Amino acid sequence: MADDNQKQPQASEHEEELTLTNRQGHPVTDNQNVRTVGNRGPITLENYNFLEKISHFDRERIPERVVHARGAGAHGVFEAYGTAGDEPISKYTRAKLFQEKGKQTPVFVRFSTVVHGNHSPETLRDPRGFATKFYTEDGNWDLVGNNLKIFFIRDPLKFPDMVHAFKPDPVTNVQDMERFFDFLANSPESTHMATFLFSPWGIPANYRQMQGSGVNTYKWVNKDGEAVLIKYHWEPVEQGIQNLTQEQANQVQGLDFNHATVDLYDAIDRGEYPEWELCVQIMSDDYHPELDFDPLDPTKLWPEDQFPFLPVGKMTLNRNPVDYFTEVEQVAFGTGVLVDGLDFSDDKLLQGRTFSYSDTQRHRVGANYQQLPINAPKSNVATNQSGGQMRYEPDTAPKQNPHVNYEPSSLGGLKEAPKAGADHEPHYYDVNLMRQKLDRPNDFAQAGETYRNFEDWERNELVANIAANLAQCADVISDKFIANLQQADTEYAQRVTDELAKIKADPSNKPLHRANKAAKLAQEKGHDAK
Ligand code: HEM
């Protein structure tokens, strides 16, 4: 018999923590049955818990990244060497994170593939993204790079067209190598990048065993305001580099299309922390007439014998994300996110990128995306910005008069920071506005060198991969692409020509399912594709 005076058992603190609630903090006592008129329904509309649960579910997705949608991430730490090669790093940059030997800065890295959507296979032939957020004492620095050291194009105006050609066909929703090679063949500056992409370097074995590169040319500025041009490179010193042949990639994909995410997560989970050394190449900040390319051209490698890789620090990834969405999906990197001592060069592609990243993130994540914990700096933030969707805390500094959300003011508002060093004097230009490409495009020479520098098995793979893909293209495209290869290296062009002829002559090669829709339509409509 119940004793009315007996105390009801109290939920322990732990049990309270485990109690299911809705977002309003109301405990949920029945999570199996909606409230209905009789047990056969209909449902009533005042079912708050059900409405909250289902309408939040309906909004679980945010737009995926327009490129680099598939990714994996991890936290870690960057440790500075205090030097660049034999020189103290202060000779080149005053950026605080690099100055002292052993100085540690927390980081978050997101690796990615580029073309296909979230959950697409991680074995695809595609550049890999390698984006790093450094949470420095001076605010965030993002180094948004790829595994390959160069890019397809040098003008940002071409980027949307390039991505359209590489992504699935707007009619069939299937990636079509004819459209892909149509863009490449008509953009000769992409010949060098195509040479890397269709070699085994286009399919890194996983994220741990690949390099990274900032690709674009940046600047470093020292305390006297003197600048040098910089390229950044990540080297996987401990893990080494491993790439896959097409055949190996097919096998991996047949077993697991998430292999790179699994590899990274499991390695960190078992305490095998991947490491990369950050190296820079340095060039004086000028036009360099002695080079056969422009130092601001992202389709070019800087020759290592003239511009050696100088190690400046080491990064270790040692902590897996707790929640994929709030960390890996909502993280937002941008090339404009620099700290004092690091600067832009005049590289046009870099400047185009710098607009694009924060623009897309205001759409993809929201106007206050920088306030999310993964994106917020770990240093002080005090702005006079206010409002906007999903703003959840004011920036007001403790000593600030909260009425003063403007600057300048004599009433106790925020004040401008003192300068950390001399201003870097930008170059003086006496030229007209124009639309023209760089003076030394030299689209083919480095593509030929890269071909010749490959090992035999890499060259064999490259030739086989290009020929297999060109076999899916109309002649007008394969002819044009091979004409570009001819200017890079005659042997390269001849081998692709011979391999292509062999594939086409073999009756056992079935016509491909992708079926050259674009070229067929062009022919039907009488476009003489030239
Ligand atoms: C992601 C634009 C070139 C590396 C993105 C995103 C955009 C974009 C809009 C999606 C960002 C987001 O939703 O958060 C551009 C434009 C380029 C360009 C306009 C040229 C004009 C490059 C180059 C590299 C690169 C040259 C390599 C150095 C990346 C990486 C990501 C990315 C790694 C993924 C970042 C992440 O993991 O969140 N790019 N991009 N992009 N881009 Fe670019």
Image: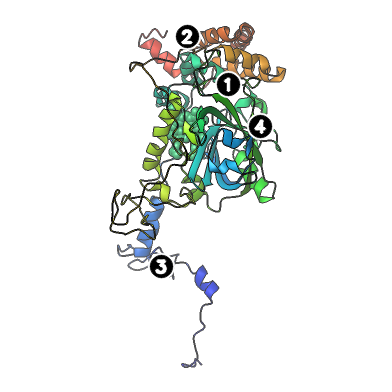
Q: CA distance from mark 3 to mark 2?
A: 65 Å
Marks 1, 3: nearer the viewer: 1
The numbered disc on residue 85 is 4
Task: Tell me the amino acid under the disc marked 2.
Answer: Val
Q: Is residue 132 above or below residue 179?
A: below
Q: Which residue is mark 3?
A: 25
Residue 36 picture location, percent across and down: 34, 66
User: In the figure, residue 122 lies in which quadrant?
Assistant: top right
For label 2, the residue is: 476
Which x, y percent locates residue 371?
41, 51
Picture residue at 34% right of the left edge, 64% below the top: 48
Mark 4: few, some, or many residues within 10 Å (few <14, many ≥20)? Answer: some
Q: Going from the N terminus, do you reach mark 4 or mark 2 first?
A: 4
Tell me which amino acid carries mark 4: Gly
Q: For the residues marked 2 and 1, what is the alpha-carbon distance in whole angstroms? A: 30 Å
Which of the pair 486/101 is nearer the observer?
Answer: 101
The Cα atoms of the two marked residues, 4 and 2, are separated by 49 Å
SS label for mark 2: helix
Identify which amino acid the numbered label 1 is placed on: Leu
Q: Is residue 116 visible?
A: no
In screen coordinates, is 88 left or right of 357? right
Tell me the CA gap for discs 4 and 1. Answer: 20 Å
State left or right for residue 56 relative to residue 323.
left
Q: Are marks 4 and 1 in contact (CB under 8 Å)?
A: no
Disc 1/disc 3 C-alpha distance (Å): 57 Å
Marked residue nearer the N-terminal end (3 or 2):
3
Q: Is mark 4 within 8 Å of ligand 1?
A: no
Q: Is residue 225 left or right of residue 39?
A: right
Please, what secondary structure does the residue beneath circle 1 have?
loop
Residue in the image at 41% along x and 9% along y: 529
